Image (cartoon, helix red, strand yellow):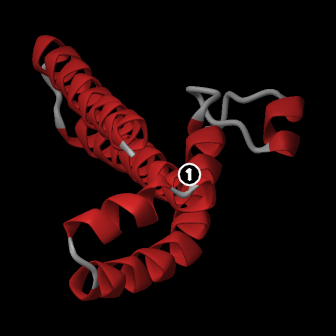
Amino acid sequence: MDFRSALNKAIGLGPAHTGIHHWWLQRLTAVALLPLTLWLIWFMHQLVLLDHAGMLAWLGKPLNGALILAYVSIACYHAHLGLREVIVDYVHHPALRLTSLLGVWMVMLFLALLAWLSMIRIVAAG
């Protein structure tokens, strides 16, 4: 038996009213990561060819720095969305679910902030 209103059926909202939003965000971040991953592979190839000073100069260029930060930020958000879905689906104890969700959020936020602060330090040093 379906207890959703006619409007919810028409716009595709489930009982939680957020499922489609998270689904779209997961797909959008995945699509954004495709070209960034190709660029990252090329970046890793450049990393092997350059010395330390050359790599710092290369990362200090605005476009390269922005692409690295975009990759790390989007990858952290994408991972957060995916891990959140796994935790919500498979962790049934409320306290453990909340702790896990907060832990994942804090780890992903820490990784993104670490990448941003590292890039600021690289740009300031160069």
Lateral position of residue 9 relative to residue 79, left or right:
right
Mark 1 residue element: helix
Q: Residue furthest top?
A: 95
Q: Say above or below: 38 vs 2.
A: below
Tell me the residue at 60%/53% (across/down): 62
Residue 87 or 118: which is nearer the viewer? Answer: 118
Lateral position of residue 115 relative to residue 3, left or right:
left
Quadrant housing residue 87: top left
Instruction: Tell me the residue that label 1 is attached to.
Output: 66
Lateral position of residue 5 relative to residue 117, left or right:
right
Q: Looking at the rendering, in which quadrant would you find the N terminus? A: top right
Q: Position of residue 75 (x, y in %)?
A: 40, 53
- Amino acid residing under circle 1: Ala
Tell me the residue at 50%/53% (across/down): 65
Residue 46 or 50: which is nearer the viewer? Answer: 50
Tell me the residue at 24%/22% (across/down): 106
Residue 35 or 104: which is nearer the viewer? Answer: 35
Disc 1 crowd, CA 10 A, few/some/many (<14, 14-19, 20+): some
Q: Position of residue 56 (x, y in %)?
A: 33, 58
Tell me the residue at 63%/58% (across/down): 28
